[in-house]
Image (cartoon, rainbow, N blue to C red):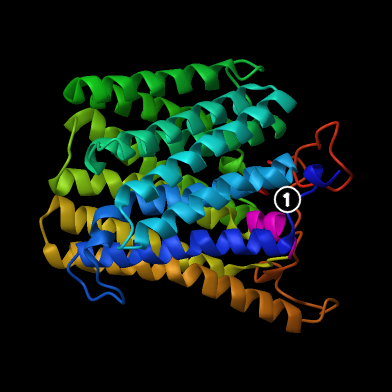
Amino acid sequence: MKNRAVPGLRTRVALLAGGGVALLAGLDGGLLLLGLPAPVTTARLLQVHGPLLVLGFVGTLVALERAVALRRRRAVVAPALLGTGGLVLLAGAVPLSVGQAVLAAGCAAALVVEVRLWQRRPCAAMAVEVLGATVGLGAAVLWWAGVPVPALVPWLAVFLVLVIAAEREELGRIGGRLGGGADGSAAVLLAVAVLAGLGAATLWPGAGHALLGLALLALVARLLAVDVARRTVRSTGLPRYVAVCLLCGYGWLAVAGAAWLVGGAATEGPAYDAVVHAVFVGFVITMIMAHAPVILPAVLRRPVPYHRALYAPVALLQASLVLRLVGGDAHGQFWALRTGGALGVAAVLLLPVVLVVATRVRRRTPRAGAGRDPDSTSGPSTPAPPDVPTSAPPAPDAPSGATTSLEVSR
C-alpha cells in the first residue's frame, strides 16, 4: 500500500533542504549575536536563533529519520511541518506566532510518529524517545505561548538529550552492553529523573537547575556504561571515528550538567553562554557529526564513505568550544568568545564539504587498489567490530531491506 512505503528520495532531499536552510540561518544568527559580519542581517534572526536551530534544524533531522523508520508516507508530515516552520520564522513579513504555531504542529506530528514506533516495538528506549518528543512539543508550545527563550533552554536541552540518549541506549542493548536491568528499566528511571529535574527547574529555577544538572550527570554515567564507544574507540576507521565523537559529546553534556549542578539557573551572561553551547554545540552537534556518515545513507539511500578527513571538523569544533568556554566565558576574553564562535560556525560548515569531497575521492578510487590505507577511505558499509551490530532487526511487518530507526553504525 502506498501509505506503507518509505518516503521517496526527492521528498527526503526536499525535507533535508528545509532543515539545511534552518541551519544556515541559525548559524547566521549566531554570528550576529557575536557582533560578527554575517551574510544576512535581520532582527528576526537574533530573536529566533536558538529555537530555529533546535526545532527547525535538528528537529527536522530527527523527525525525518523517524519517518523513514516508520515507513509510512504520511509520517513525513512531521519533518515537513518543522522545516516549514523554520522557513516561516525567517519571513519577516509573517507574524512570529505563525512560525511558532507551525513548529508546534510539527512537534505534535513527530510525537505521533514516536508513539506509533513505540506501539510497533515496545521497549524502554522507545519509551524514552516518546518522553523526549513530548518535551519537544512542550518546548514549542511554551515558546508559542510567549515564554522567553532563556527560560526554554532546559526544555530544548532535555528534548534532544532524551532522544539521543534513547538511541544510544538501544544500540548498547543490541551490542550486549546493557546493564542495570536487561529490560532497560534503569534508562526509564533516569529519563524520569531528568523530567523531574526539568519540572523542578521550571517551577523553582535555583534548586531545580541543580537537580536537573545532577540528573544529567547520572544519565551521562549511564550512557558511558552501556555505550560500546569505550571499546570501539580502540578500533579503526568509521567505528573509531564515531566513538571519538560520542565520547567528546558525553564530555560536553557532563560539563553542562556540572554547570547547572554547581551554578544553578542562568539566563544570561557567561554561565548561560557556556551551558547553552556545551549542550547544543558540544553534545548535539558532535553527535550529528558522529552519525552523519551513517544516517545520511540510511535516509538518502546513497553511500557516504568514511574518510579520516572527517576528524577535521570534529577537532575544529572541540577546539572552538574550549576557546569559547574557557577563554571567553571563564576568563572574560571577548576575542576568545568571538573567535571560538566563528570557528564553531566554520566547523559545522566544513562537515558537508568533507563529506562531499570524501564521496568524490571514493568514486575515483579503484575498488581493488592494493595496499590502500584502510583508515583513510573505507567503503559505504565499513564493517564494525564483530560484536558491534550495525542495525536492529526489522520490525515484523517491515518489508525486506527497509530502513530501521537503529541503522547507526558504531
Query: Which stretch did the figure color magenta?
Result: 294-302
Indicate the quadrant containing the N terminus: top left, top right, bottom left or bottom right: top right
Answer whether residue 251 is visible to the viewer in this image. yes
Residue 318 placement (x, y as % from top left): 37, 58
Say left or right for 404 vs 287: right
Query: On the picture, is 322 further left or further right than 350?
Result: left
Could you say where residue 159 lies in the image, as x and y percent from the top left?
A: 44, 35
Image point (33%, 58%), residue name: 94
- SS assignment for the magenta stretch, majority: helix
Residue 157 found in image quarter:
top left
Q: Residue furthest right?
A: 400
Q: Where 325 sits versus 309, above or below?
A: above
Comparing 97 with 119, the one in front is 97
Report x, y in % for residue 302: 73, 65
Left or right of 35? Residue 183 is right
Secondary structure under tag 1 reads: loop
Q: Residue at x 45, y 18 (%)?
A: 192
Q: Quadrant of residue 154?
A: top left
The location of residue 23, given as percent across then percent down, is 43, 61
User: How many circles with numbers are drawn on the protein?
Assistant: 1
- Residue 35 within the segment the image draws in magenta: no
- Crowding near pointer 1: few (<14 within 10 Å), some, many (20+)? some
When the figure is inspected, residue 211 is found, relative to residue 314, above or below; the finding is above
Vertically, is 47 above or below 276?
Answer: below
* Tag 1: amino acid: Ala
The residue at 25%/38% (across/down) is: 146
On whether residue 298 falls in the magenta region, the answer is yes
In the foreground, 7 or 366? 7
Q: Is residue 245 visible?
A: no
Provide the residue designation for mark 1.
384
